[in-house]
Amino acid sequence: MRTIILGAGLAAVGAGSAFAGGIDRSGQGVSQIFEKGSYVELGFSVGHPSVSGKDVAAFGGQPSGNVGGDFTQLSLAYKADINDRLSYAIIIDQPFGADLNYAPTSIALGGTKVTADATSATGVLRYKFDDNWSVYGGIRADKASGDITLKGLAYGPFNGYRVQLSDDVGYGYLVGAAYERPDIALRVALTYNSRIKHSFDTLETLGGAPIGNKPTDVSTPQSVNLDFQTGIAENTLLFGQVRWADWSDFDIDPITFTTLANGGKFVKGGGLIDLEDTTTWTVGLGRKFNDNWSGAVSISYEKKGDPLVSPLAPTNGRVGMTLAGVYTQDNLKITTGINYTKLGDAQPETGTPDVARANFTGNDVVAVGVRIGYSF
């Protein structure tokens, strides 16, 4: 039954969350710690977003082009037992990322672009009190970088501004607890992921001329994952997840830009990004067909917030569906999945107070993935 729940979540990793929930991509899952015995896993997915819109009439209604770039996600995990009660896992993934580029056809925002990358290495230790209760925790090292360019008439005097955030490594932690009943395939696991603070070496330029180089402090968001699964009939599993992420505390405030944008005063949260907290809901059904094949279908949902959004995150809420299949042969498990996510309409804005500069409608993301696991 465990192969069903792992397969069901595959395509959602790095797929529907790519343009929702801030810059969430992996969901920071630690399901590998629950595998039996020694286990190694390799995952790969690729996503194709279609995210486009048009300038508002004041800027001529010109198209933005597809601002979303294709992306890939890689993950690697190893789990082993120390004894009957203690086990550990090492997980490498890419929890956050962004790749946006507005076409020059847009008068309001053309040339605006952002790239952001993060790679995490997580070590998790789990202690089992008995067959039902366990606790786990660990440390996480996160390497991140970013490059943001603001272009277009909507940015006024900041048209042509660029900030480069060099590679930085930050550290955080996770803690969690789980309750299981193996006889009915029940598991409820609650995981808290701490924020991770980065202090990036920074270069700010305007029209290519340097205007600042003081470090920029950025914290990736704290989050909580509630994962559950239970058998509801023979060879049939109900599963889901609720994930909350504290994106309202995710600020990118380069010192020079933020000071100039706020009338000569540095204001925390008054810089490049303004996001809302997100809660993402997922529920699905899995079914084991025979000794080799199982499959699952799941639906995910994230409610809409304020339609006025940052041009660097031009969507608002989402609804997605994942289909997954799992093939098991002896110790080998191969999972494949496809995810389709409908992204909510949004209005990229600039200025103080916020003013809509474009309308984005009818957008989506399609992703496929494969995960290979081997027990030994």
Image: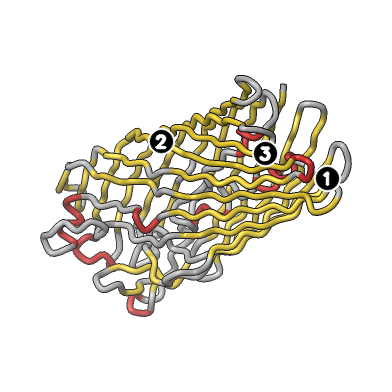
Query: In which quadrant of the rendered image does the N terminus lie?
Result: top right
User: Label 1 belongs to which residue?
Assistant: 288
State the residue in front, 16 or 226: 226
Relative to 102, residue 216 above or below: above
Image position of 2 (left or right of 355): right
In the rendered picture of this protein, how many numbered marks are placed on residues?
Answer: 3
Given residues 138 and 145, the one toward you in this image is: 138
Q: Which residue is drawn at 51% across and 48% down?
A: 25
Is the residue under label 2 in contact with that under label 3 (CB below 8 Å)? Answer: no
Q: Which of these two is toward me, 88 or 357? A: 88
Which residue was labeled with disc 3?
132
Q: How crowded is mark 1: few (under 14 residues within 10 Å), some or many (20 or more)?
A: some
Residue receiving disc 2: 142
Q: What element carries label 3?
A: loop
Q: Residue at point 28% right, 43% down? A: 164
Counting from the top left corner in percent of width and height, residue 258 is at 20, 56
Which amino acid is tagged 2?
Asp
Secondary structure at badge 2 equals strand
- Mark nearer the N terminus (2 vs 1): 2
Label 2 crowd (10 A; few <14 / some 14-19 / many >=20): many
At numbered mark 1, what does the secondary structure look like: helix, strand or loop?
strand
Residue 87 in the image: x percent, y percent?
Answer: 59, 26
Which tag is nearer the camera, tag 3 or tag 2?
3
Q: How far apart are marks 1 and 3 (CA)?
A: 24 Å
Q: Please name the amino acid that badge 3 sits on.
A: Asn
Residue 86: image quadrant is: top right
Tell me which residue sits at (19%, 58%) in the image: 267
Specify which label sits upstream in the sequence, 3 or 2: 3
> Looking at the image, is 30 positioned above or below residue 163?
above
**Of circles 1 and 3, which is in front?**
3
Amino acid carrying label 1: it is Lys
